[in-house]
Image (cartoon, rainbow, N blue to C red):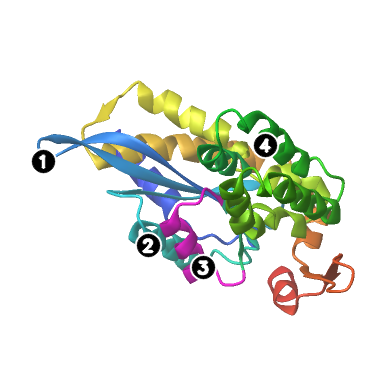
Amino acid sequence: MAADLDAQVEAFRTRPLDQGPYTFLAADALTMKVREGGRVVLVHVLVATGVNGDGHREILGLQVTSAEDGAGWLTFFRDLVARGLTGVRLVTSDAHAGLVAAIGATLPGATWQRCRTHYAANLMATCPKASWPWVKTLLHSVYDQPDAASVHVRFDRLVEAVADKLPKVADHLEAARADVLAFTAFPKEIWRQIWSNNPNERLNREIRRRTDVVGIFPDRDALIRLVGAVLAEQHDEWIEGRRYLGLDVLNRSRLTVITDPDTGENKEVTDPAMQALTA
């Protein structure tokens, strides 16, 4: 039974990614315990999900690495590209340096969106505890704006509000500006789906629910077998269910967005490369 399941999981993990372009991608890692060489060690389970050309979510990849470093993420993304990953416009993840570098090295033209939930936790670590409530309120107000221009204006006001009293927080915000606000280059109606990794939390909870029963895996093969089966099951549910994103908003998301230097407004222009992918 295990051998049969291994074959199914391997076929799932190595299948061609031929349902692109995969406009939006999210990447995350979970740590788990495995017995190796008579010891219990932590390994990192790398998972990527994406939205395919038909608007459905897919599980794109699963790999287990000894460390969540640049080499592991680079190998992971290279495998996705070799299997056919194309058309990625935005990748949402936390700010792991190796992950971000791998995105730049393997997905030219893709923008990185720093997960807003992870960023809030990072910002909180630099902010005095007594000041965090009002800084958090101002940060959340940035995401509540009706359009991209208003988001950027409110972000400017946030930086100005903390500049004098909390210069370290202001510097942190300024350094993260482009990455935290990358979502504004895309249609407003899908911001909630792309500005954080929160849509994957249900998936992560299901993985944890299944793996917590095991606790410590006897080897990596057993880990891949169980997690791969969980992901394959979720993948099938997504593909057979309703579209995650509509085709109209996907088509608009594949347009190149430029910012008018005079007005600061975003304008959509046709991207020939994207036209070729979707033709």
Residue 42, image x, y percentages:
27, 38
| Separation of residues labelled 2 and 4 (CA atoms) | 38 Å
Instruction: Residue under label 2, please give it.
Output: 75
Residue 69, image x, y percentages:
35, 55
Q: Is residue 46 above or below residue 253?
A: above
Residue 261 counted in the magenta span: no
Q: Which residue is more in the foreground, 205 or 259?
A: 259
Residue range of the region highlighted in magenta in the rendering:
93-109
Instruction: Residue under label 3, please give it.
Output: 104
Look at 54% across and 68% down and name the residue there.
Answer: 107
In front: mark 4 or mark 1? Answer: 4
| Separation of residues labelled 1 and 2 (CA atoms) | 24 Å
- Dot 1 or dot 3, earlier in sequence: 1
Q: Label 4 crowding class (10 Å Cα cut-off): few <14, some 14-19, many 20+?
A: many
Q: Amino acid at mark 2?
A: Thr
| Separation of residues labelled 4 and 1 (CA atoms) | 48 Å
> Is residue 244 among the parts visible in the rendering?
no
- Dot 3 or dot 2, earlier in sequence: 2
Look at 59% across and 58% down and name the residue there.
Answer: 175
In front: mark 3 or mark 2? Answer: 3
Residues at circles 1 and 3 in contact by the CB criterion of under 8 Å: no
Q: Amino acid at mark 1?
A: Gly
Q: Under tag 2, what secondary structure?
A: helix
Q: Under tag 4, what secondary structure?
A: helix
Instruction: Residue under label 4, please give it.
Output: 135
Instruction: Residue under label 1, please give it.
Output: 37
Q: Under tag 3, what secondary structure?
A: helix
Q: Label 1 crowding class (10 Å Cα cut-off): few <14, some 14-19, many 20+?
A: few
Q: Amino acid at mark 4?
A: Val
Instruction: State the mark number for residue 244.
Output: none
Residue 95 counted in the magenta span: yes
Residue 244, quarter of the rendered image:
top right
